[in-house]
Amino acid sequence: MKKLIIFLVILICFLLAIQVVRAGDPDDIGSNNMIMKVNKNKLISDYEIKKKEYDIKTGKPIDFYIDFHLGLGATSASISNATNNGAYETASKLGAMLGGVIHLNLFDVISFTSGLNLQGKSFKFTPPVTDTLAIQTMGAGEKNLSNTYLNIPLNINVGGMISEKVGLIFYGGPYIGIRLNNDNYNGLGYKNFDLGLNGSLILNYVIQYPLSIIFGTKFEFGGLNRLGSTNLIENISTSNYSFFSGARIWF
């Protein structure tokens, strides 16, 4: 019995010695060092990304980013007859939109948006058959009025990042539009300057700062300055709904 106990003690000591030798194996030490080095490099990389994100989003009196938009919208019109001899029929048409807007954040107090936006706002209209003067001046039947505007918005922003990757922002306010084409009809009196209101809702997803992809929708109501005003036309106003996507870049 005593010999068996001595044998077991020797066996346990031998096994412990083997474990100590293995723990000091240079190959194992090298593997552990490699793993530690990889983990260290990842930590440094993650730190640099987060630091850059922090520098972009905070600590600056003026923070700004640019959105690039590409989308499609539909425009409908309302035409008021000055002679009260029937109602003008209108139909909407599709038009492309393209532009870039700059979002400015001043001292974390006020945030606003401006920029340049090309917007197609074409529509169809038909003079009333009961309005003899309108038929004589513009002709009978349905007509296409092609409009392309260069819009300059002046908007106030509300919203921001709602998670680490996702942001939601609404901005709205007045805009001024300059008509870039001269398509018109006698008696319609369509103007080349548009004053209106607009609002946009934009969802952005951060790929990696400073780049995000965006999806949005926009509404514009034009004609606060009476787009048409003649002896035949009392007023013309327009409504445009657009959907767009694009990219956002922080600076």
Image (cartoon, grey):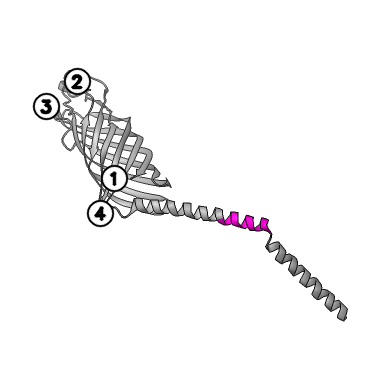
**Which secondary structure type mostly characterizes the magenta part of the structure?**
helix
The mark nearer the N terminus, 4 or 2, is 4
Q: Which residue is mark 3?
A: 231
Of the residues shown, which amino acid type is indicated by label 4? Answer: Phe
Q: Nearer the viewer, mark 3 or mark 1?
A: 1
**Label 4 with label 3: CB-CB less than 8 Å:** no
What stretch of residues is rendered in magenta? 25-36
| Residue 145: % across, % down | 25, 25
| Residue 137: % across, % down | 16, 19
Q: Which residue is mark 4?
A: 107
Of the residues shown, which amino acid type is indicated by label 1? Answer: His
Q: Nearer the viewer, mark 4 or mark 3?
A: 4
Residue 78 visible in image: yes
Real-space CA distance between mark 2 and mark 1, rounded to the nearest whole angstrom: 44 Å
Q: Residues within 10 Å of mark 2 (few under 14, many from 20)?
A: some
Q: Which residue is mark 2?
A: 138
Q: Nearer the viewer, mark 4 or mark 2?
A: 4
- Snapshot quadrant of residue 172: top left
In the rendered image of this protein, does residue 142 appear above or below residue 224? above
Circle 3 — which element? loop
Q: Residues within 10 Å of mark 4 (few under 14, many from 20)?
A: few
Task: State yes or no: residue 248 in magenta.
Answer: no
